[in-house]
Image (cartoon, rainbow, N blue to C red):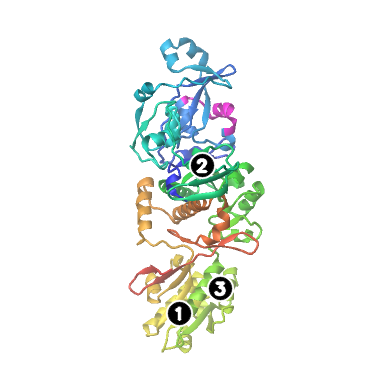
Amino acid sequence: MQKGIIRPILSLMAAIAIGSGFAAELYAQEYESTPVTISKEKLRIGDQVCYSHIVLERQTLFSICQAYNVTLEDIYKYNPSVKEKGLQKNSILRIPVKEAAEELKSEPAAEAASAPLQEVITETEKPQEPGPEAAETSRRIHTVKWYEDLDVIADKYGVTVEAIMKANGLKGRKLSRRQQLVIPAPGEVIEIETEEITEPVADNQVSIQTDTVQIADTVVKEEKKGLADFLFPKKETSLSLLLPFKATGSTSSTGNMDFYSGVLMAVYDMAEEGYDTQLNVYDTAGGKMPVTKERLEDSDIVIGPVSPTEISQAFETGPDAKAIVSPLDQRALSLVESYRAMIQAPTPHYVLYNDLIAWIKEDMDFSDRLLVISEKGAKQTETVVEMKAAIDSSGLEYKPLSYSILEGRNVTGSLEYLMTESGTNRVYIASDSEAFVNDVVRNLNVMIHKKYEVVLYAPSRIRNYETIEVENFHNASLHISAGYHIDYDDARVQEFLLKYRALFNTEPTQFAFQGYDLASYFIELNARYGSRWYERLDEADKSMLQSTFRFRRDGNGGYVNTGVRRIIYGEDWSVKKIR
Protein backbone atom coordinates (compact mmCIF):
# COMPACT_ATOMS: atom_id res chain seq x y z
CA MET A 1 0.00 0.00 0.00
CA GLN A 2 1.37 3.41 -0.91
CA LYS A 3 1.76 5.71 2.04
CA GLY A 4 1.58 8.75 -0.21
CA ILE A 5 -2.11 8.31 -0.80
CA ILE A 6 -3.04 7.91 2.84
CA ARG A 7 -4.03 10.87 4.95
CA PRO A 8 -1.10 11.74 7.20
CA ILE A 9 -3.10 13.64 9.75
CA LEU A 10 -3.94 12.34 13.21
CA SER A 11 -7.65 12.05 13.89
CA LEU A 12 -7.75 11.67 17.65
CA MET A 13 -10.79 11.64 19.87
CA ALA A 14 -11.53 10.39 23.35
CA ALA A 15 -15.04 8.95 23.21
CA ILE A 16 -15.43 7.98 26.84
CA ALA A 17 -18.85 6.44 27.45
CA ILE A 18 -19.21 5.96 31.21
CA GLY A 19 -22.60 7.34 32.10
CA SER A 20 -22.20 11.11 31.86
CA GLY A 21 -18.89 10.94 29.97
CA PHE A 22 -15.20 10.55 30.74
CA ALA A 23 -13.88 12.21 33.88
CA ALA A 24 -12.22 15.58 33.70
CA GLU A 25 -8.87 14.11 34.69
CA LEU A 26 -8.36 12.57 31.26
CA TYR A 27 -9.15 15.82 29.50
CA ALA A 28 -6.77 17.70 31.78
CA GLN A 29 -3.67 15.96 30.47
CA GLU A 30 -0.92 18.08 28.98
CA TYR A 31 -2.26 17.77 25.48
CA GLU A 32 -2.49 20.58 22.94
CA SER A 33 -5.98 20.78 21.50
CA THR A 34 -7.13 22.65 18.42
CA PRO A 35 -8.50 26.13 19.22
CA VAL A 36 -12.28 26.45 18.94
CA THR A 37 -13.57 29.41 16.92
CA ILE A 38 -17.20 30.47 17.28
CA SER A 39 -18.98 29.67 14.03
CA LYS A 40 -20.63 32.47 12.04
CA GLU A 41 -23.13 30.07 10.52
CA LYS A 42 -26.50 29.70 12.24
CA LEU A 43 -29.64 27.73 11.56
CA ARG A 44 -33.05 27.37 13.15
CA ILE A 45 -34.31 24.08 14.53
CA GLY A 46 -37.93 24.62 15.47
CA ASP A 47 -37.96 27.61 17.82
CA GLN A 48 -34.27 27.27 18.70
CA VAL A 49 -31.44 29.04 16.90
CA CYS A 50 -28.24 26.98 16.73
CA TYR A 51 -24.68 27.52 15.62
CA SER A 52 -23.47 25.17 12.90
CA HIS A 53 -19.99 24.15 14.10
CA ILE A 54 -17.60 21.98 12.05
CA VAL A 55 -15.51 19.72 14.31
CA LEU A 56 -11.78 19.99 13.62
CA GLU A 57 -9.10 17.49 14.52
CA ARG A 58 -8.24 17.33 18.25
CA GLN A 59 -11.18 19.45 19.29
CA THR A 60 -12.95 18.00 22.32
CA LEU A 61 -16.42 18.30 23.77
CA PHE A 62 -14.88 20.03 26.76
CA SER A 63 -13.22 22.78 24.70
CA ILE A 64 -16.29 23.23 22.47
CA CYS A 65 -18.59 23.58 25.47
CA GLN A 66 -16.28 26.18 27.00
CA ALA A 67 -16.05 28.20 23.78
CA TYR A 68 -19.82 28.28 23.20
CA ASN A 69 -20.72 28.53 26.91
CA VAL A 70 -23.00 25.49 26.80
CA THR A 71 -23.21 22.22 28.71
CA LEU A 72 -22.67 18.66 27.50
CA GLU A 73 -26.40 18.09 27.85
CA ASP A 74 -27.05 21.00 25.46
CA ILE A 75 -24.87 19.36 22.82
CA TYR A 76 -26.33 15.89 23.41
CA LYS A 77 -29.87 17.31 23.09
CA TYR A 78 -29.33 18.59 19.53
CA ASN A 79 -26.73 15.97 18.54
CA PRO A 80 -27.89 12.64 20.05
CA SER A 81 -25.41 10.60 17.99
CA VAL A 82 -22.49 12.30 19.76
CA LYS A 83 -23.43 10.73 23.08
CA GLU A 84 -23.22 7.26 21.55
CA LYS A 85 -20.40 7.61 19.02
CA GLY A 86 -18.39 10.57 20.26
CA LEU A 87 -16.99 13.39 18.14
CA GLN A 88 -16.16 12.76 14.50
CA LYS A 89 -13.72 14.96 12.61
CA ASN A 90 -15.44 17.14 9.98
CA SER A 91 -18.87 16.38 11.45
CA ILE A 92 -21.29 19.27 12.05
CA LEU A 93 -22.50 20.04 15.56
CA ARG A 94 -25.68 21.97 16.23
CA ILE A 95 -24.98 24.14 19.27
CA PRO A 96 -27.86 26.12 20.79
CA VAL A 97 -27.43 29.89 20.94
CA LYS A 98 -28.08 31.17 24.45
CA GLU A 99 -30.86 33.78 24.55
CA ALA A 100 -31.03 33.60 20.76
CA ALA A 101 -34.16 35.72 20.39
CA GLU A 102 -32.69 38.70 22.25
CA GLU A 103 -29.42 38.42 20.38
CA LEU A 104 -31.15 38.35 17.01
CA LYS A 105 -33.23 41.42 17.79
CA SER A 106 -30.17 43.42 18.80
CA GLU A 107 -27.89 42.28 16.00
CA PRO A 108 -26.83 45.09 13.64
CA ALA A 109 -27.65 44.55 10.01
CA ALA A 110 -24.01 44.34 9.04
CA GLU A 111 -23.30 41.63 11.61
CA ALA A 112 -26.40 39.76 10.58
CA ALA A 113 -25.14 39.77 7.03
CA SER A 114 -21.85 38.21 8.11
CA ALA A 115 -23.62 35.57 10.19
CA PRO A 116 -26.80 34.78 8.26
CA LEU A 117 -29.64 32.94 9.94
CA GLN A 118 -30.89 30.12 7.77
CA GLU A 119 -33.86 27.81 7.94
CA VAL A 120 -33.10 24.09 7.81
CA ILE A 121 -34.02 23.16 4.23
CA THR A 122 -33.69 20.05 2.14
CA GLU A 123 -32.78 21.67 -1.18
CA THR A 124 -30.45 24.53 -2.07
CA GLU A 125 -30.24 26.63 -5.15
CA LYS A 126 -27.38 25.91 -7.47
CA PRO A 127 -24.93 28.83 -7.14
CA GLN A 128 -23.99 30.72 -10.24
CA GLU A 129 -20.60 29.73 -11.53
CA PRO A 130 -18.13 32.62 -11.55
CA GLY A 131 -16.55 33.60 -14.82
CA PRO A 132 -12.87 33.04 -15.60
CA GLU A 133 -11.85 36.55 -14.51
CA ALA A 134 -13.66 36.28 -11.19
CA ALA A 135 -12.15 32.85 -10.57
CA GLU A 136 -8.63 34.13 -11.22
CA THR A 137 -9.00 37.09 -8.89
CA SER A 138 -10.63 35.06 -6.10
CA ARG A 139 -7.79 32.55 -5.79
CA ARG A 140 -6.13 32.75 -2.38
CA ILE A 141 -3.03 31.48 -0.61
CA HIS A 142 -3.54 29.36 2.51
CA THR A 143 -0.78 28.52 5.00
CA VAL A 144 -1.31 25.04 6.44
CA LYS A 145 -1.67 24.84 10.22
CA TRP A 146 -0.47 21.80 12.18
CA TYR A 147 -3.98 20.47 12.81
CA GLU A 148 -5.34 20.88 9.27
CA ASP A 149 -5.67 18.38 6.46
CA LEU A 150 -7.05 18.72 2.94
CA ASP A 151 -10.62 17.96 4.03
CA VAL A 152 -10.61 20.75 6.63
CA ILE A 153 -9.06 23.26 4.21
CA ALA A 154 -11.42 22.36 1.36
CA ASP A 155 -14.44 22.72 3.62
CA LYS A 156 -13.18 26.06 4.93
CA TYR A 157 -13.01 27.58 1.44
CA GLY A 158 -15.97 25.76 -0.06
CA VAL A 159 -13.97 23.91 -2.70
CA THR A 160 -13.20 20.24 -3.32
CA VAL A 161 -10.11 18.36 -2.19
CA GLU A 162 -9.44 17.36 -5.80
CA ALA A 163 -9.50 21.01 -6.88
CA ILE A 164 -6.87 21.96 -4.30
CA MET A 165 -4.70 18.98 -5.25
CA LYS A 166 -4.92 19.86 -8.94
CA ALA A 167 -4.23 23.56 -8.37
CA ASN A 168 -1.08 22.73 -6.38
CA GLY A 169 0.11 19.68 -8.33
CA LEU A 170 -0.23 17.43 -5.27
CA LYS A 171 0.17 13.70 -5.90
CA GLY A 172 -0.83 12.66 -2.40
CA ARG A 173 -2.80 13.96 0.55
CA LYS A 174 0.12 14.54 2.90
CA LEU A 175 0.72 18.17 3.91
CA SER A 176 3.48 19.79 5.93
CA ARG A 177 3.14 22.49 8.54
CA ARG A 178 3.33 26.06 7.11
CA GLN A 179 3.03 24.71 3.57
CA GLN A 180 1.41 27.29 1.29
CA LEU A 181 -1.47 26.17 -0.91
CA VAL A 182 -3.18 27.93 -3.78
CA ILE A 183 -6.93 27.83 -3.16
CA PRO A 184 -8.94 27.88 -6.41
CA ALA A 185 -12.11 29.93 -6.62
CA PRO A 186 -15.36 28.17 -5.68
CA GLY A 187 -16.89 26.68 -8.80
CA GLU A 188 -13.65 26.87 -10.78
CA VAL A 189 -13.37 23.83 -13.00
CA ILE A 190 -10.25 21.80 -12.24
CA GLU A 191 -9.68 18.98 -14.67
CA ILE A 192 -8.32 15.70 -13.35
CA GLU A 193 -6.26 13.93 -15.94
CA THR A 194 -7.24 10.32 -16.45
CA GLU A 195 -6.39 7.89 -19.17
CA GLU A 196 -8.96 7.46 -21.87
CA ILE A 197 -10.99 4.29 -21.52
CA THR A 198 -11.32 2.83 -24.98
CA GLU A 199 -13.05 -0.40 -24.04
CA PRO A 200 -16.48 -0.51 -22.41
CA VAL A 201 -16.21 -1.43 -18.75
CA ALA A 202 -18.91 -3.33 -16.93
CA ASP A 203 -20.66 -1.71 -14.00
CA ASN A 204 -18.62 -1.73 -10.79
CA GLN A 205 -15.49 -2.89 -12.66
CA VAL A 206 -12.49 -0.60 -13.02
CA SER A 207 -9.27 -1.03 -15.02
CA ILE A 208 -6.78 1.71 -14.20
CA GLN A 209 -3.14 2.21 -15.19
CA THR A 210 -0.93 4.52 -13.11
CA ASP A 211 2.82 4.99 -12.86
CA THR A 212 3.17 2.67 -9.91
CA VAL A 213 0.30 0.22 -9.77
CA GLN A 214 -2.02 -1.57 -12.17
CA ILE A 215 -5.44 -2.75 -11.11
CA ALA A 216 -7.19 -4.90 -13.68
CA ASP A 217 -10.52 -6.71 -13.66
CA THR A 218 -11.10 -5.68 -10.03
CA VAL A 219 -14.64 -5.43 -8.80
CA VAL A 220 -14.89 -2.18 -6.88
CA LYS A 221 -17.97 -1.71 -4.75
CA GLU A 222 -18.07 2.07 -4.65
CA GLU A 223 -21.72 3.07 -4.57
CA LYS A 224 -21.01 6.48 -3.05
CA LYS A 225 -17.52 7.17 -4.33
CA GLY A 226 -16.58 8.56 -7.69
CA LEU A 227 -13.45 8.01 -9.73
CA ALA A 228 -11.58 10.72 -7.84
CA ASP A 229 -12.18 8.98 -4.51
CA PHE A 230 -10.91 5.74 -6.03
CA LEU A 231 -7.78 7.46 -7.32
CA PHE A 232 -7.16 9.15 -3.96
CA PRO A 233 -8.41 6.65 -1.38
CA LYS A 234 -8.68 7.57 2.28
CA LYS A 235 -7.20 5.09 4.72
CA GLU A 236 -8.19 5.34 8.36
CA THR A 237 -7.86 2.86 11.19
CA SER A 238 -10.55 2.80 13.86
CA LEU A 239 -8.87 1.85 17.14
CA SER A 240 -10.80 1.41 20.41
CA LEU A 241 -8.84 1.36 23.67
CA LEU A 242 -10.55 -0.16 26.74
CA LEU A 243 -8.59 0.15 29.99
CA PRO A 244 -9.49 0.55 33.70
CA PHE A 245 -8.19 4.09 34.15
CA LYS A 246 -10.17 4.62 37.38
CA ALA A 247 -10.34 8.24 36.26
CA THR A 248 -13.40 9.03 38.40
CA GLY A 249 -11.84 7.80 41.64
CA SER A 250 -9.36 9.38 44.00
CA THR A 251 -6.52 7.20 42.72
CA SER A 252 -6.12 6.66 39.00
CA SER A 253 -4.29 3.71 37.48
CA THR A 254 -0.81 5.04 36.73
CA GLY A 255 0.23 2.00 34.70
CA ASN A 256 -2.81 2.17 32.44
CA MET A 257 -2.41 5.93 31.99
CA ASP A 258 1.20 5.27 30.94
CA PHE A 259 -0.07 2.64 28.49
CA TYR A 260 -2.51 5.22 27.09
CA SER A 261 0.33 7.74 26.71
CA GLY A 262 2.25 5.18 24.67
CA VAL A 263 -0.79 4.64 22.45
CA LEU A 264 -1.05 8.40 21.87
CA MET A 265 2.61 8.48 20.84
CA ALA A 266 2.03 5.61 18.41
CA VAL A 267 -1.01 7.27 16.86
CA TYR A 268 0.97 10.48 16.36
CA ASP A 269 4.00 8.69 14.87
CA MET A 270 1.87 6.57 12.55
CA ALA A 271 0.14 9.75 11.35
CA GLU A 272 3.56 11.10 10.43
CA GLU A 273 4.02 7.95 8.35
CA GLY A 274 0.72 8.59 6.59
CA TYR A 275 -1.55 6.29 8.60
CA ASP A 276 -4.61 8.12 9.89
CA THR A 277 -6.18 6.79 13.11
CA GLN A 278 -9.46 7.39 14.87
CA LEU A 279 -8.86 6.63 18.54
CA ASN A 280 -11.77 5.94 20.90
CA VAL A 281 -10.94 5.58 24.61
CA TYR A 282 -13.15 3.96 27.26
CA ASP A 283 -12.72 3.62 31.03
CA THR A 284 -13.67 0.09 32.11
CA ALA A 285 -12.97 0.66 35.82
CA GLY A 286 -15.41 -1.04 38.16
CA GLY A 287 -16.27 -3.78 35.69
CA LYS A 288 -18.21 -1.41 33.42
CA MET A 289 -18.37 -1.97 29.67
CA PRO A 290 -19.10 1.61 28.48
CA VAL A 291 -19.02 0.81 24.78
CA THR A 292 -21.81 -0.18 22.42
CA LYS A 293 -22.04 -3.34 20.36
CA GLU A 294 -21.87 -1.23 17.19
CA ARG A 295 -18.67 0.56 18.26
CA LEU A 296 -16.91 -2.68 19.17
CA GLU A 297 -17.86 -4.41 15.95
CA ASP A 298 -17.13 -1.37 13.76
CA SER A 299 -13.62 -0.94 15.19
CA ASP A 300 -10.76 -2.27 13.08
CA ILE A 301 -8.81 -2.99 16.27
CA VAL A 302 -9.85 -3.24 19.93
CA ILE A 303 -7.04 -3.15 22.51
CA GLY A 304 -8.23 -4.18 25.97
CA PRO A 305 -9.83 -4.73 28.36
CA VAL A 306 -7.23 -6.21 30.72
CA SER A 307 -8.74 -8.86 33.00
CA PRO A 308 -10.15 -12.16 31.69
CA THR A 309 -13.59 -11.28 33.09
CA GLU A 310 -13.70 -7.95 31.25
CA ILE A 311 -12.43 -9.52 28.02
CA SER A 312 -15.23 -12.10 28.17
CA GLN A 313 -17.68 -9.26 28.78
CA ALA A 314 -16.34 -7.42 25.72
CA PHE A 315 -16.90 -10.48 23.52
CA GLU A 316 -20.44 -10.81 24.91
CA THR A 317 -21.08 -7.14 24.09
CA GLY A 318 -19.63 -7.37 20.59
CA PRO A 319 -19.64 -11.03 19.51
CA ASP A 320 -18.75 -10.10 15.93
CA ALA A 321 -15.79 -7.88 16.82
CA LYS A 322 -12.97 -8.24 14.26
CA ALA A 323 -10.31 -8.72 16.93
CA ILE A 324 -9.84 -7.99 20.63
CA VAL A 325 -6.24 -7.72 21.84
CA SER A 326 -5.43 -8.76 25.40
CA PRO A 327 -2.62 -6.29 26.16
CA LEU A 328 -1.21 -7.04 29.62
CA ASP A 329 -2.62 -9.94 31.64
CA GLN A 330 -1.06 -13.41 31.38
CA ARG A 331 -4.18 -14.91 32.95
CA ALA A 332 -6.22 -14.00 29.86
CA LEU A 333 -4.41 -16.81 28.01
CA SER A 334 -7.12 -19.19 29.27
CA LEU A 335 -9.67 -17.45 26.99
CA VAL A 336 -7.80 -17.92 23.71
CA GLU A 337 -9.26 -21.34 22.97
CA SER A 338 -12.79 -19.96 23.48
CA TYR A 339 -12.61 -16.88 21.23
CA ARG A 340 -11.27 -17.14 17.71
CA ALA A 341 -11.05 -13.33 17.43
CA MET A 342 -8.86 -12.97 20.52
CA ILE A 343 -5.18 -12.00 20.36
CA GLN A 344 -3.03 -12.62 23.45
CA ALA A 345 -0.18 -10.09 23.33
CA PRO A 346 1.94 -11.06 26.39
CA THR A 347 4.14 -14.05 25.57
CA PRO A 348 2.95 -17.00 27.73
CA HIS A 349 5.31 -18.38 30.35
CA TYR A 350 5.35 -21.85 28.81
CA VAL A 351 6.65 -20.35 25.55
CA LEU A 352 9.50 -18.70 27.46
CA TYR A 353 10.40 -21.94 29.27
CA ASN A 354 10.37 -23.93 26.03
CA ASP A 355 12.60 -21.35 24.37
CA LEU A 356 15.01 -21.49 27.31
CA ILE A 357 15.29 -25.27 26.91
CA ALA A 358 15.74 -24.92 23.14
CA TRP A 359 18.53 -22.43 23.82
CA ILE A 360 20.26 -24.91 26.13
CA LYS A 361 20.03 -27.56 23.39
CA GLU A 362 21.64 -25.19 20.90
CA ASP A 363 24.49 -24.36 23.31
CA MET A 364 25.24 -27.86 24.63
CA ASP A 365 28.55 -29.38 23.62
CA PHE A 366 29.58 -33.01 24.14
CA SER A 367 31.80 -32.03 27.10
CA ASP A 368 29.14 -29.87 28.78
CA ARG A 369 26.88 -30.89 31.64
CA LEU A 370 23.32 -29.81 32.43
CA LEU A 371 22.22 -29.40 36.05
CA VAL A 372 18.57 -28.91 37.00
CA ILE A 373 18.20 -27.49 40.52
CA SER A 374 14.89 -27.42 42.40
CA GLU A 375 13.76 -26.69 45.96
CA LYS A 376 13.13 -29.71 48.19
CA GLY A 377 9.71 -29.80 49.83
CA ALA A 378 8.50 -26.64 48.09
CA LYS A 379 4.93 -26.17 46.95
CA GLN A 380 4.46 -27.28 43.34
CA THR A 381 3.11 -24.07 41.87
CA GLU A 382 1.87 -23.80 38.30
CA THR A 383 5.13 -22.07 37.37
CA VAL A 384 7.29 -24.86 38.82
CA VAL A 385 5.18 -27.53 37.11
CA GLU A 386 5.53 -25.76 33.74
CA MET A 387 9.30 -25.32 34.17
CA LYS A 388 9.80 -29.00 35.03
CA ALA A 389 7.52 -30.11 32.20
CA ALA A 390 9.59 -28.10 29.71
CA ILE A 391 12.87 -29.76 30.71
CA ASP A 392 11.39 -33.27 31.09
CA SER A 393 9.79 -33.20 27.62
CA SER A 394 12.97 -31.95 25.94
CA GLY A 395 14.83 -35.26 25.87
CA LEU A 396 17.92 -33.61 27.38
CA GLU A 397 20.01 -35.59 29.86
CA TYR A 398 20.63 -33.71 33.09
CA LYS A 399 21.88 -34.10 36.65
CA PRO A 400 19.14 -33.26 39.18
CA LEU A 401 19.86 -31.51 42.47
CA SER A 402 17.18 -30.78 45.04
CA TYR A 403 17.83 -29.15 48.40
CA SER A 404 16.04 -26.96 50.93
CA ILE A 405 17.08 -23.41 51.59
CA LEU A 406 18.27 -24.43 55.07
CA GLU A 407 20.79 -26.77 53.42
CA GLY A 408 22.15 -24.01 51.19
CA ARG A 409 25.32 -23.40 53.17
CA ASN A 410 26.41 -27.02 52.77
CA VAL A 411 25.46 -27.65 49.15
CA THR A 412 28.76 -26.73 47.49
CA GLY A 413 30.06 -30.26 48.02
CA SER A 414 27.11 -31.68 46.08
CA LEU A 415 27.67 -29.14 43.30
CA GLU A 416 31.34 -30.12 43.02
CA TYR A 417 30.34 -33.77 42.74
CA LEU A 418 27.83 -33.07 39.92
CA MET A 419 29.81 -30.49 37.93
CA THR A 420 32.42 -31.08 35.24
CA GLU A 421 35.81 -29.38 35.06
CA SER A 422 36.36 -30.12 31.35
CA GLY A 423 33.33 -28.33 29.93
CA THR A 424 30.63 -25.81 30.71
CA ASN A 425 28.15 -26.44 33.49
CA ARG A 426 24.78 -25.23 32.25
CA VAL A 427 22.35 -24.68 35.13
CA TYR A 428 18.56 -24.51 34.96
CA ILE A 429 16.70 -23.46 38.13
CA ALA A 430 13.17 -24.91 38.35
CA SER A 431 11.83 -22.62 41.07
CA ASP A 432 9.87 -19.37 41.42
CA SER A 433 10.97 -18.69 45.01
CA GLU A 434 13.13 -15.56 45.22
CA ALA A 435 14.84 -16.74 48.41
CA PHE A 436 15.75 -20.13 46.93
CA VAL A 437 16.87 -18.71 43.56
CA ASN A 438 19.02 -16.18 45.44
CA ASP A 439 20.67 -19.01 47.36
CA VAL A 440 21.35 -21.00 44.16
CA VAL A 441 22.91 -17.98 42.44
CA ARG A 442 25.11 -17.35 45.50
CA ASN A 443 26.32 -20.96 45.49
CA LEU A 444 26.98 -20.86 41.74
CA ASN A 445 29.20 -17.83 42.27
CA VAL A 446 31.13 -19.81 44.88
CA MET A 447 31.72 -22.51 42.25
CA ILE A 448 32.78 -19.87 39.70
CA HIS A 449 35.43 -18.63 42.15
CA LYS A 450 36.58 -22.24 42.35
CA LYS A 451 37.23 -22.01 38.58
CA TYR A 452 34.23 -23.99 37.39
CA GLU A 453 32.76 -22.64 34.16
CA VAL A 454 29.07 -21.92 34.76
CA VAL A 455 26.24 -20.57 32.59
CA LEU A 456 22.89 -19.92 34.26
CA TYR A 457 19.57 -20.18 32.37
CA ALA A 458 16.52 -18.60 34.01
CA PRO A 459 13.12 -17.07 33.23
CA SER A 460 12.87 -13.31 32.94
CA ARG A 461 11.31 -12.77 36.37
CA ILE A 462 14.74 -13.34 37.92
CA ARG A 463 15.63 -9.77 36.91
CA ASN A 464 12.99 -8.47 39.34
CA TYR A 465 14.46 -10.24 42.37
CA GLU A 466 15.89 -7.36 44.40
CA THR A 467 17.80 -9.57 46.85
CA ILE A 468 20.19 -10.88 44.18
CA GLU A 469 23.32 -8.89 43.43
CA VAL A 470 23.45 -7.94 39.74
CA GLU A 471 27.17 -8.71 39.76
CA ASN A 472 26.31 -12.38 40.35
CA PHE A 473 24.19 -12.40 37.17
CA HIS A 474 27.16 -11.20 35.12
CA ASN A 475 29.55 -13.65 36.80
CA ALA A 476 27.21 -16.55 35.94
CA SER A 477 26.69 -15.33 32.36
CA LEU A 478 22.93 -15.28 32.95
CA HIS A 479 20.85 -16.28 29.89
CA ILE A 480 17.22 -15.11 29.87
CA SER A 481 14.33 -15.83 27.52
CA ALA A 482 12.10 -12.79 27.95
CA GLY A 483 8.83 -11.51 26.58
CA TYR A 484 9.90 -7.91 27.21
CA HIS A 485 13.28 -6.24 26.91
CA ILE A 486 14.25 -2.68 25.97
CA ASP A 487 17.56 -2.23 24.15
CA TYR A 488 18.59 1.33 24.98
CA ASP A 489 21.29 1.21 22.30
CA ASP A 490 18.58 0.84 19.65
CA ALA A 491 18.19 4.08 17.66
CA ARG A 492 14.40 3.60 17.58
CA VAL A 493 14.28 3.40 21.37
CA GLN A 494 16.43 6.51 21.72
CA GLU A 495 14.15 8.45 19.38
CA PHE A 496 11.09 7.31 21.33
CA LEU A 497 12.68 8.39 24.62
CA LEU A 498 13.41 11.89 23.33
CA LYS A 499 9.87 12.35 22.00
CA TYR A 500 8.22 10.94 25.12
CA ARG A 501 10.27 13.10 27.48
CA ALA A 502 9.53 16.20 25.42
CA LEU A 503 5.79 15.50 25.31
CA PHE A 504 5.10 14.18 28.82
CA ASN A 505 8.07 15.58 30.79
CA THR A 506 8.79 12.19 32.36
CA GLU A 507 10.43 8.84 31.64
CA PRO A 508 8.37 6.16 29.84
CA THR A 509 7.57 3.04 31.83
CA GLN A 510 7.26 -0.48 30.46
CA PHE A 511 3.52 0.17 30.18
CA ALA A 512 4.19 3.13 27.88
CA PHE A 513 6.44 1.00 25.68
CA GLN A 514 3.81 -1.75 25.53
CA GLY A 515 1.09 0.70 24.54
CA TYR A 516 3.30 2.15 21.83
CA ASP A 517 4.34 -1.24 20.46
CA LEU A 518 0.82 -2.66 20.27
CA ALA A 519 -0.83 0.43 18.77
CA SER A 520 1.82 1.07 16.12
CA TYR A 521 2.01 -2.63 15.17
CA PHE A 522 -1.73 -3.09 14.63
CA ILE A 523 -2.29 0.30 12.97
CA GLU A 524 0.39 -0.51 10.40
CA LEU A 525 -1.02 -4.01 9.93
CA ASN A 526 -4.49 -2.64 9.24
CA ALA A 527 -3.06 -0.05 6.84
CA ARG A 528 -1.13 -2.70 4.91
CA TYR A 529 -3.79 -5.39 4.65
CA GLY A 530 -7.07 -3.53 5.22
CA SER A 531 -10.06 -5.06 6.97
CA ARG A 532 -8.70 -8.59 6.41
CA TRP A 533 -5.49 -7.94 8.33
CA TYR A 534 -6.45 -10.55 10.93
CA GLU A 535 -6.00 -13.30 8.33
CA ARG A 536 -2.39 -12.22 7.72
CA LEU A 537 -1.37 -12.04 11.37
CA ASP A 538 0.81 -15.15 11.34
CA GLU A 539 2.83 -13.65 8.45
CA ALA A 540 3.53 -10.34 10.19
CA ASP A 541 6.39 -11.09 12.61
CA LYS A 542 8.04 -7.88 13.77
CA SER A 543 10.52 -6.71 16.40
CA MET A 544 9.20 -3.64 18.21
CA LEU A 545 10.77 -1.39 20.86
CA GLN A 546 10.10 -3.63 23.85
CA SER A 547 8.48 -6.77 22.43
CA THR A 548 8.78 -9.12 19.51
CA PHE A 549 5.42 -9.96 17.95
CA ARG A 550 5.14 -13.43 16.45
CA PHE A 551 1.48 -14.39 16.57
CA ARG A 552 0.39 -17.95 15.89
CA ARG A 553 -3.10 -19.44 16.00
CA ASP A 554 -3.77 -21.71 18.96
CA GLY A 555 -5.65 -24.66 17.47
CA ASN A 556 -9.17 -23.53 16.60
CA GLY A 557 -8.98 -20.60 19.00
CA GLY A 558 -7.40 -17.18 18.78
CA TYR A 559 -3.81 -16.03 18.40
CA VAL A 560 -0.96 -16.25 20.92
CA ASN A 561 2.25 -14.24 20.79
CA THR A 562 5.23 -16.61 20.64
CA GLY A 563 7.81 -13.85 20.27
CA VAL A 564 10.83 -14.20 22.59
CA ARG A 565 13.91 -12.07 23.20
CA ARG A 566 17.13 -13.74 24.29
CA ILE A 567 19.26 -11.72 26.70
CA ILE A 568 22.81 -12.41 27.94
CA TYR A 569 24.51 -10.79 30.94
CA GLY A 570 28.17 -10.58 29.95
CA GLU A 571 31.21 -10.68 32.21
CA ASP A 572 32.02 -7.15 30.98
CA TRP A 573 28.79 -5.91 32.63
CA SER A 574 27.02 -5.73 29.30
CA VAL A 575 23.39 -6.78 28.80
CA LYS A 576 22.89 -7.78 25.17
CA LYS A 577 19.88 -8.85 23.17
CA ILE A 578 21.09 -11.52 20.78
CA ARG A 579 17.65 -12.28 19.27
- Does residue 468 appear in this view? no
Instruction: Answer with mark 1 or mark 2, whichever residue precedes in sequence.
Output: 2
Q: Residue at x 47, y 75 (%)?
A: 457
Q: Chief secondary structure of the magenta span?
A: helix
The spot of residue 86 in percent (x, y) is 55, 36
Question: Disc 1 on helix, strand or loop?
Answer: helix
Q: Residues within 10 Å of mark 1 (few under 14, many from 20)?
A: few
Q: How far, Cα to Cα, is label 3 from label 2? A: 66 Å
In the rendered image, the vertical position of residue 417 relative to residue 34, given as above or below? below
Toward the viewer: 389 or 3?
Answer: 3
Residue position for label 2? 197
Residue position for label 3? 387
Numbered disc in front, either 1 or 2: 2
Q: Residue at x 46, y 42 (%)?
A: 195
- The label shown at residue 52 is none
In the rendered image, the vertical position of residue 450 relative to residue 65, given as above or below? below
Amino acid bearing label 3: Met
Q: How far, Cα to Cα, is label 3 from label 1? A: 19 Å
The segment highlighted magenta reads: 68-81
Numbered disc in front, either 3 or 1: 1
Amino acid bearing label 2: Ile
Say if the magenta span includes residue 70.
yes
- The label shown at residue 363 is 1
Q: Residues within 10 Å of mark 2 (few under 14, many from 20)?
A: few
